[in-house]
Image: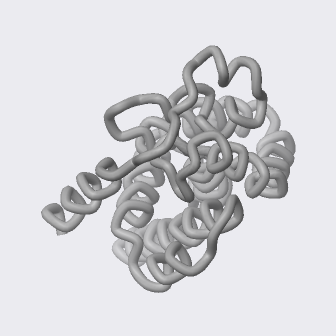
C-alpha cells in the first residue's frame, strides 16, 4: 500500500505542463489565490498535503470559536468551489494541476465537521485518512476523476475522498466504543 501511495505521488508531480502563477499574480486575482490555497499550492513538494494542512489550520479555530461559522465556511467553499478550481485550471492550462488545492481545503473542512470528537488526535486521524484516500483514489473516486472535467470534476473527487475518510473514522469510533 505504501509503495502504491508513493507511486501515485510521483506520477502526480510528473507532467504538470502549463503555466504556474507566481505569488504576485495570486495577490492580483482572489479566485486564483483561493484556488492555490493561499499560496500553499505553489509548493514544489506535496502541494496537496500542504493545502490540506492549511485547510486544517485555518478551519479548526473557526469551528471551535463559532461552529455555525465553520458550517457557513464549508458550505460557501463548496458552493463556489467549482468556480474557484476552474480559475486555477484556466490559469495553468492543466485540468487538475497539483497546485490547485482548494478542493483539498474544502474536503478536509467537511471531514473535520463530521468527526466523532473535536480533539487533536481526531484532527490528526482526519488529516491522515483524507490524504490516504485523496492520493490512492479507490473506486469510484478514480472513475469520477477521469470522467468529470472542469472545476467541479476537481472538487467532486476530493469530496468523495472526504466521505471515504469519514466512513473509516466512524468505523474506528464504533470499534473503540465496542472495545469499551
Residue beneath the point at 49% across and 45% down: 123
Colour scheme employed for the rendering of this structure: one colour
Residue toward you, 45 or 23: 23
| Residue 117 in picture, x, y percent from top left | 57, 53
Residue 180 visible from this viewpoint: no
- Where residue 144 sits, quadrant-wise, is bottom right
| Residue 159 in picture, x, y percent from top left | 61, 65
Residue 93 visible from this viewpoint: yes
Residue at the farthest top position: 24
Label count reads: 0
- Where residue 67 sits, quadrant-wise, is top right
Residue toward you, 173 or 89: 89
Q: Is residue 165 left or right of residue 160?
A: left
Q: Is residue 26 left or right of residue 19?
A: right
Residue beneath the point at 35% across and 40% down: 46
| Residue 72 in picture, x, y percent from top left | 86, 47
Which quarter of the rendering shows the C terminus? bottom left
Residue beneath the point at 34% across and 74% down: 179
Residue toward you, 180 or 118: 118
Placement of 35 over or under 153, stated as above or below = above
Residue beneath the point at 59% across and 57% down: 111
| Residue 17 in picture, x, y percent from top left | 42, 46
Amino acid at each position: 500500500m505504501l509503495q502504491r501511495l508513493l507511486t501515485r505521488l510521483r506520477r502526480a508531480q510528473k507532467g504538470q505542463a502549463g503555466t504556474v502563477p507566481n505569488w504576485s499574480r495570486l495577490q492580483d486575482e482572489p479566485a486564483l489565490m483561493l484556488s492555490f490555497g493561499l499560496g500553499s499550492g505553489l509548493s514544489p513538494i506535496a502541494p496537496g498535503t500542504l493545502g490540506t494542512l492549511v485547510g486544517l489550520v485555518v478551519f479548526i479555530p473557526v469551528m471551535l470559536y463559532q461552529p455555525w461559522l465553520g458550517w457557513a465556511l464549508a458550505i460557501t467553499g463548496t458552493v463556489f468551489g467549482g468556480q474557484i478550481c476552474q480559475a486555477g485550471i484556466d490559469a495553468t492550462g492543466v485540468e487538475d494541476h497539483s497546485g490547485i488545492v482548494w478542493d483539498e481545503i474544502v474536503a478536509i473542512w467537511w471531514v473535520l465537521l463530521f468527526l466523532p470528537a473535536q480533539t487533536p488526535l481526531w484532527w490528526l486521524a482526519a488529516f491522515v485518512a483524507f490524504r490516504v484516500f485523496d492520493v490512492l483514489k479507490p473506486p469510484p473516486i478514480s472513475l469520477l476523476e477521469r470522467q468529470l472535467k472542469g472545476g467541479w470534476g476537481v472538487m467532486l473527487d476530493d469530496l468523495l475522498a472526504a466521505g471515504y475518510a469519514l466512513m473509516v473514522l466512524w468505523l474506528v469510533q464504533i470499534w473503540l466504543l465496542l472495545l469499551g
